[in-house]
Amino acid sequence: MFVEVDLMRICQDMVYLQASSHLKERAMSLTNSWYTIDEAASKFGLSTEHLQEWVDNGLVRTEGNNGRVILLNSDDIERQLKMSPSV
């Protein structure tokens, strides 16, 4: 009986750890979805001018301060890359 209970608890702990690991990876991907324009240019192989054009046209969400763009949303950049025939 104790062996069965211990085995069941071990299995539950393994499932919990796997779920926790998945959630941690998901949380990390969520926290890495905003980049400075220089970081985004480097990550996606684009010029800062090209990214700024997308920002100016309202194609990429931004976070800023006092009217100045500080961060760009990587999901929007990826979407634009998929929609663009060539960059």
Image: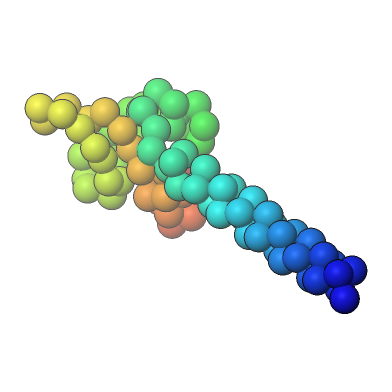
Instruction: Report whether 12 appears left or right of 3.
Output: left
72, above or below 22, in the image: above
Q: Quadrant of residue 12?
A: bottom right
Q: Whole-percent x and y of residue 15?
A: 71, 63
Which residue is situated farthest in the left direction here?
Answer: 66
Which residue is found at the position 87% from the left and 76% from the top? Answer: 1
Which residue is found at the position 86% from the left and 70% from the top? Answer: 2
Q: Whole-percent x and y of residue 56?
A: 21, 39
Is residue 7 among the parts visible in the rendering?
yes
Is residue 85 among the parts visible in the rendering?
no
Q: Nearer the viewer, residue 33 or 76?
A: 33
78, above or below 52, in the image: below
Q: Whole-percent x and y of residue 36?
A: 36, 28
Instruction: Report whether 13 appears left or right of 52.
Output: right
Q: Nearer the viewer, residue 10 or 30?
A: 10
Which residue is found at the position 11% from the left and 30% from the top? Answer: 67
Q: Whole-percent x and y of residue 18?
A: 69, 57
